Image (tube, rainbow, N blue to C red):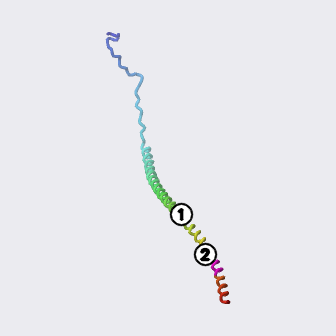
Amino acid sequence: MPNGDGGNANPPAPQPDPDRVPVALPKPAMTGTGTKIWGWAKDVLVILVIPLFLWGVKLEVNNAKVDSELAHQAEEIERLERELEEAQDIDKGVQANALKLVQLEGKLDTANGRLDDIKELLRDR
């Protein structure tokens, strides 16, 4: 069926706008000085970052060692506290025994004194 445009069923292709001119934007280029500054900045960052990274690793290793030593020392402290409690219990027992020994010595002295009195009475008879 004819449609009034000469029998062509496809719409016409868009035509470029004659008032519009394509403009290519320039890429920002580094000048020789900018490139040198960037190179120096990169060198400084590399010089700083690598030692800082190694320093951080060293700190972590040292912290791990300190944590391990602290854990070991905490266990040692607990062991020594248990031994101290045992020694204090033994000391209490020794002190109690020393007190009883003094009491027994007093009783033996009294008994010996009475035995001497009995001996003298028996001799006098």
What residue do we see at 58% from left, 69% from top? 93
- Seen in the picture, residue 78 relative to 102 is either above or below; the reply is above
- Front one among 70 and 65: 70
Q: Confirm whether the magenta stretch covers residue 106.
A: yes
- Seen in the picture, residue 54 relative to 1 is either above or below; the reply is below
Question: Which secondary structure class fits the magenta region best?
Answer: helix
Residue 17: x and y, percent? 40, 21
Q: Amino acid at mark 1?
A: Arg
Q: Confirm whether the magenta stretch covers residue 2.
A: no
The residue labelled by disc 2 is: 101
Q: Is residue 93 left or right of residue 19?
A: right
Q: Amino acid at mark 2?
A: Leu
What residue do we see at 42% from left, 32% from top? 25
Magenta range is: 102-111
Mark 2 and mark 1 lie on one chain; the one further toward the N terminus is: 1
The residue labelled by disc 1 is: 82
**Quadrant of res 3:** top left
Local SS, label 1: helix
**Quadrant of res 112:** bottom right
Q: Is residue 15 left or right of residue 106?
A: left
